[in-house]
Image: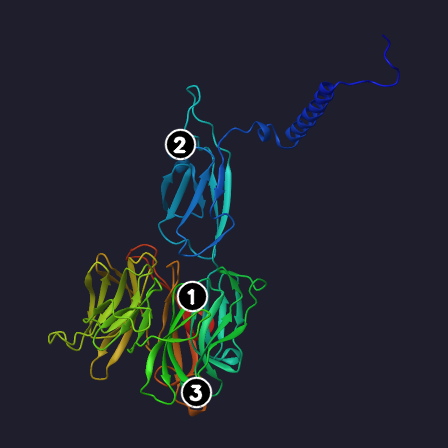
Amino acid sequence: MTMPTGKLLLHPIDKISLFLIAIFMVVIGGLIIGDKTCGSECFLRKGPRIKSFSWQNQHIGAKDQAFILTFDRPMDTASVEANLVIDPPLPGKFSWAGRRLAYTLEKPAPYGQTYQVQLSEARERFRQQGKPGEVMEPFVGEFQSRDRALAYIGTQGEEQGRLVIYNLTQQIKRILTPDDLVVMDFEFYPQGDLLLFSAAPQGRGIDGLRELQLYTVTTGINNGVDNPTANPPGKVQLVLDNEDYQNNQFDLSDNGEIIVLQRVNRNNPADFDLWMLKSGDKPERLKVTGGEFSITPDSQTLAVARGEGIGILPLEPGAEPLDFLPKFGQLLSFSPNGSAAAMVDFNTDDANLRYTRSLFYVNNQGVQKELLNTQGSIVDCEFNLKGTMLYCLLTELVNAEQYKEQPYFAKFDVKKGTMVPLATLSDYQDIQISLAPDGLALLFDQVITSDNPLFNDKLTSNSGAAIVGGKLWLLIPPMQNNSNTQVELKELPLVGFRPQWLP
């Protein structure tokens, strides 16, 4: 039998075989090319590796306290912990859940820095034929902390009465609010992208306090990082007008979703109450009267000075109090997790201590620890992030007849009940403090006032005096509790008052 010429007849099985041979040749060729470009480990890779790093290319804030490394197989934990390097160093603790490693920081990461996480020489857990487990592939991850930035109310030139934000990390300054508004007070939203502020029309002076309206303004900061492209600065939006009610003190919840403010009926001054404003809703009367107030860190309850005591109430209209602390006349601040507070007892019930006041640490376990008894003033206090330290602005009565006060800063260890003086100031007038979220610096102002009537239509202090200037200072406490280490005081090249740190 003769075969036809010019054509090769292939059976189906032959076609399949040729097709598979062609595929294998392509794969082998790719491996050979890969070997030449990146080495034999590219396709002979068998060591363990990190599948994910939770902070990779992220910008973290003070409340970000732990990152997670996820491995592709069980690891020898001792070798991982011995070889993990963070640069600059961030002390912390290890904890494991299977293939996931959580590293919890002992302190917040200092702001304004870039960090690298490096891991090499760590081994997998299981041995192979009596040999140690395979060594992992080297890993390098990177993240940044938020920029170190602050906002303040300007006092001179084009900044007068306007909100200004200054990025210390990038040395960028921006005026945020228009020149036809005079800002009285403000607070940051949690991501730093917005500021909530109260303001009145320019030229009203102290009468402007009766014409305040609430606004928001964009900062140019996005997720804690200066980014004017993603968040164009200076966009002002009206939140609440003053048509029927005069707006006074306000507070913004930690989650940025609730505003509580005191309002007075313009037609009936006896009608004053606290109101709640939730995002996207109309203002709602809480049916709560009282003095100074503060939203708790969980954004669910409200602390209000009521008569001789502090009431704790749910953020609901007409709600019954959850607790009442009759001993205390003033709430200074909450710890960041809301489990403790700094309060003032004016000692009105104790004849032996009358005309003095006491600083107390109070927590939700029933502890009421006196930290200080003084004839001077307890102006303000702020907790560090862990709630273990309390930084306070206090005064000492140095001349009882003229009631002259000497202001000073002090740090309290709330567990030990000990106080460490930090710095003494030469003058006291309307000082406001703000502790940096990473706990490394205390920001404060020194207001300059004048009795000249020409300034009465401009900025005014709490006492009604005309503000003509203001100095902003940084107080940098010692990193260690070492009596030989000096506190550092730095005057910032900024002119303003009521400074606040970016969260």
Which quadrant holds the N terminus? top right
**Residue under the point 22% across and 69% down:** 324
Question: How far is disc 1 from disc 3 in space, using C-alphas?
Answer: 30 Å
Find numbered disc 1 in the image and state the secondary structure of the residue it sits on: loop
Q: Nearer the viewer, mark 1 or mark 2?
A: 1
Mark 1 or 3, nearer chain start: 3
What is the number of the mark on residue 76?
A: 2
Mark 2 crowdedness (10 Å alpha carbons): few <14, some 14-19, many ≥20: some
**Residue under the point 82% across and 18% down:** 8
Q: Is residue 430 visible?
A: no
Q: Nearer the viewer, residue 498 or 124?
A: 124
Location of mark 3 (residue): 205
Q: Nearer the viewer, mark 1 or mark 3?
A: 1
Amino acid at dot 2: Asp
Question: How far is disc 1 from disc 2 in space, using C-alphas?
Answer: 43 Å
**Residue under the point 26% across and 80% down:** 404
Q: Give how far across and how far down residue 477 sits, in percent.
A: 34, 61
Amino acid at dot 1: Gly
Task: Give the vertical position of 253 relative to 84 (above or below).
Answer: below
Amino acid at dot 3: Gly
Location of mark 1 (residue): 256
Q: Give how far across and how far down residue 178 sits, in percent.
A: 53, 78
Q: Is residue 418 visible?
A: yes
Task: Give the vertical position of 482 relative to 462 (above or below).
Answer: above
